[in-house]
Amino acid sequence: MVSVMVSALNTAGVNGTTRRSRVALIVKEPSERGALLAVLERDAHIEPIVFDNVQALGSSDLDGMDAVVISHQALARLKGAETLGFVKLGRGARVIIALNSDELLEASSTMSNADGWIFVDVNVNHLPEVIELSKQGYSIMPGPVIERLAANKLRIAEYDRLPELEKKVIDLIALGYGNHEIAEKLGLSGAHTKALVKSGLTRLHFQNRTQAAVFVARQIKPMISAAQG
């Protein structure tokens, strides 16, 4: 950790003394919460405070917080008093959204509500730096995330260009159907189905059917739901 963090993560107190930065953690998933909490607890200049759910946002428990780390799922579910509490909190504390890199598209609707992002599967150990940079108006976007974003963007564009029949085949692969079942559903021969599967996977640069299924579930379905909603 760079030396600037030592002074930056301390908050000035009375008579020039310093206190530890108070950071709220609102992440329900146990393994993600554990990973984030471990990083915060290792930093002597941070006082982490764990909240079980978003209901804390509707109370006065978060008064005086310097930052809040909240999962994108929790942020997306805010309503009523919780939303008002979040708005109030954001006036004085930095808001850091916690997510995994493969959830970026899914979390896109909440990204504008944050001062920074921490990718639990990529750069969780940089959480203190992310908090500090957010105070200065900057955010870290790890290289692997940028690469994945670029690859997924290209795949989404290529998926849109697929012939309709080939697109249906990819969608059925994502539902777990084998070639024989796909052939029956679409009224195709086995050879034609095999050729469409190979073509679709090749054009989208997938090495296997599992990668195609994850792509459709994580990238295509959320876009379709957003368009319909």
Image (cartoon, rainbow, N blue to C red):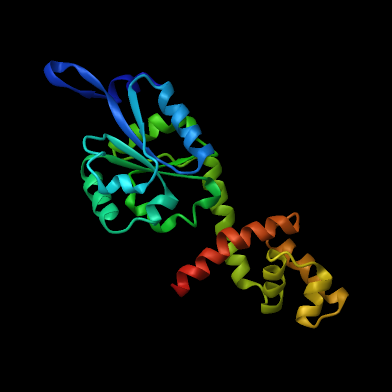
Name the spot of residue 157 as percent of width and height, x first.
Answer: 57, 66
Residue 58 lies, with reference to residue 79, above or below; the image says above
Question: Residue 35 versus residue 151: which sits nearer the camera?
Answer: 35
Question: Residue 76 versus residue 28: which sits nearer the camera?
Answer: 28
Residue at the left extreme of this rendering = 15
Which of the image's four quarters has the C terminus?
bottom left
Q: Please give the name of the residue rendered at 50% of the width and 43% of the height, measured from the top-left corner.
A: 29
Direction from residue 173 to residue 9 in the image, left or right: left
Residue at the bottom extreme of this rendering = 187
Direction from residue 81 to residue 41 in the image, left or right: right
Q: Quadrant of residue 107?
A: bottom left
Residue 85 lies, with reference to residue 50, above or below; the image says below
Direction from residue 124 to residue 96 in the image, left or right: left
Q: How many marks?
A: 0
Direction from residue 180 to residue 229 in the image, left or right: left
Residue 142 lies, with reference to residue 189, above or below; the image says above
Q: Please give the name of the residue rendered at 82% of the width and 69% of the height, measured from the top-left corner.
A: 179
Which of the image's four quarters has the N terminus?
top left
Q: Please give the name of the residue rendered at 39% of the width and 56% of the height, measured from the top-left corner.
A: 77
Q: Quadrant of residue 127?
A: top left
Name the spot of residue 104 as percent of width and height, x first.
Answer: 49, 52
Q: Quadrant of residue 196?
A: bottom right
Name the spot of residue 156 as percent of width and height, x first.
Answer: 58, 64
Name the spot of residue 4 as percent of width and height, x first.
Answer: 33, 21
Q: Please give the name of the residue rendered at 25% of the width and 39% of the height, measured from the top-left corner.
A: 61
